[in-house]
Image: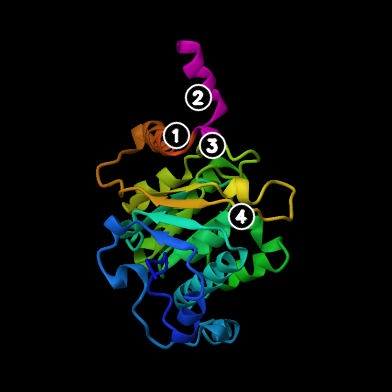
């Protein structure tokens, strides 16, 4: 097999053999430095007993995070294998860092890809009301992912501070959708400031993940997944060691512009395109 996008979570030989039946996942050769980087290291792990393990791990909340990640890796990849979309993964050498991973959001497929491709020890963050989402909300809480109070700006900032402390003290990574919601058209939306606040508090580097094509594969208000090709591109980490609170808007714009640069025209923000046209 030329390559696959998996990493250390594919530790059960039976599952690895299962996925080797189909070669829909391609990693850019120039960015693969070892077999371990693409998950060909094997080691038995009973991940199918995830629910039972979660119950036993209730007294250890951050072990539940890691166990949930392992289960998510396998579930996410299995779902993508079943759907059959060809996937190209670039920049995989940036995929296993302790960092804040951010990602554009235009399709439910984004969730499956993030479940699959973020490293073990990664926690998600969502509004506190997620607990009321049937099944998903309860699983989210059981896996000890973070929730924030967005009822007002001061409550949101305080929640962010506590979340950042949890990330640092437990040596975790974070994954967040900076747009704050799913784009209905696939075009990039403005970024919220939350990911910058998290970076300022944690001093974690930011690793942008650019997803291309997911909005074509699974469109809004459709139950049909089309066989459109997908690309997952990790950009080089952005150091936040010297970031300061007086430049928050500048950082948000800088990262947003990175996405605009790497997205195809069909996913660039319309307002930006209109501005470009007016200047010519």
Pointer 3 with pointer 4, Cβ within 8 A: no
Pointer 1 with pointer 2, Cβ within 8 A: yes
**Residue 142: percent from left, percent from top:** 59, 73
In the image, taking residue 130 as reference, residue 161 lies left or right, namely left
Q: Provide the residue designation for mark 3.
A: 267
Q: Provide the residue designation for mark 2.
A: 272
Disc 3 to disc 4, C-alpha distance: 18 Å
Magenta residue span: 265-280
**Residue 154: percent from left, percent from top:** 52, 43
Label 3 vs 4, first from the N-terminus: 4
Disc 3 to disc 1, C-alpha distance: 8 Å
Specify whether residue 162 is in view: no
Disc 4 to disc 2, C-alpha distance: 29 Å
Pointer 4 with pointer 1, Cβ within 8 A: no
Label 3 vs 1, first from the N-terminus: 1
Q: Which mark is residue 260?
A: 1
- Dominant SS of magenta comes to helix
**Which quadrant of the structure image shows residue 249?**
top left
Please tell me which residue lies in front, 17 or 266. 17
Q: Residue at x 43, y 36 (%)?
A: 256
Dot 2 crowding, Cα within 10 Å, few <14, some 14–19, many 20+: few
Label 4 vs 1, first from the N-terminus: 4
Q: Secondary structure at mark 2?
A: helix
In the image, taking residue 118 as reference, residue 94 lies left or right, namely left
Label 3 vs 2, first from the N-terminus: 3
Q: Provide the residue designation for mark 4.
A: 227
Above/below status of 256 relative to 214: above
Pointer 3 with pointer 2, Cβ within 8 A: no
**Residue 206: percent from left, percent from top:** 36, 49
Disc 3 to disc 2, C-alpha distance: 11 Å
Specify whether residue 98 is in view: yes
**Residue 137: percent from left, percent from top:** 66, 65
């Amino acid at each position: 097999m030329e390559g696959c996008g998996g990493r250390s979570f594919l530790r059960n030989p039976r599952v690895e053999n299962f996925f080797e039946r189909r070669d829909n996942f391609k990693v850019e050769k120039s960015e693969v430095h070892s077999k371990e980087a693409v998950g060909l290291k094997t080691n038995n792990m009973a991940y199918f007993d995830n629910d039972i393990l979660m119950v036993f791990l209730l007294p250890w909340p951050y072990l539940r995070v890691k166990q949930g990640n392992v289960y998510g890796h396998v579930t996410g990849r299995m779902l993508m294998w079943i759907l059959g979309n060809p996937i190209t993964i670039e920049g995989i050498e940036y995929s296993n860092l302790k960092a804040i991973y951010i990602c554009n959001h235009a399709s439910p497929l984004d969730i499956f890809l993030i479940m699959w491709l973020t490293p073990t020890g990664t926690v998600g963050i969502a509004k506190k009301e997620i607990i009321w989402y049937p099944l998903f909300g309860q699983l989210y809480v059981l896996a000890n992912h973070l929730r924030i109070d967005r009822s007002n700006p001061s409550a949101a900032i305080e929640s962010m501070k506590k979340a950042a402390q949890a990330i640092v003290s437990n040596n975790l990574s974070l994954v967040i959708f900076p747009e704050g919601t799913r784009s209905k058209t696939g075009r990039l939306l403005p970024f919220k400031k939350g990911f910058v606040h998290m970076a300022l508090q944690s001093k974690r580097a930011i690793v942008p993940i650019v997803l291309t094509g997911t909005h074509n594969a699974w469109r809004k208000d459709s139950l049909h997944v089309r066989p459109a090709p997908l690309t997952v591109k990790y950009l080089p980490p952005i150091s936040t060691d010297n970031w300061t609170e007086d430049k928050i808007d500048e950082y948000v714009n800088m990262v947003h512009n990175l996405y605009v640069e790497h997205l195809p025209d069909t996913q660039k923000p319309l307002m930006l395109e209109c501005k470009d046209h007016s200047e010519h």
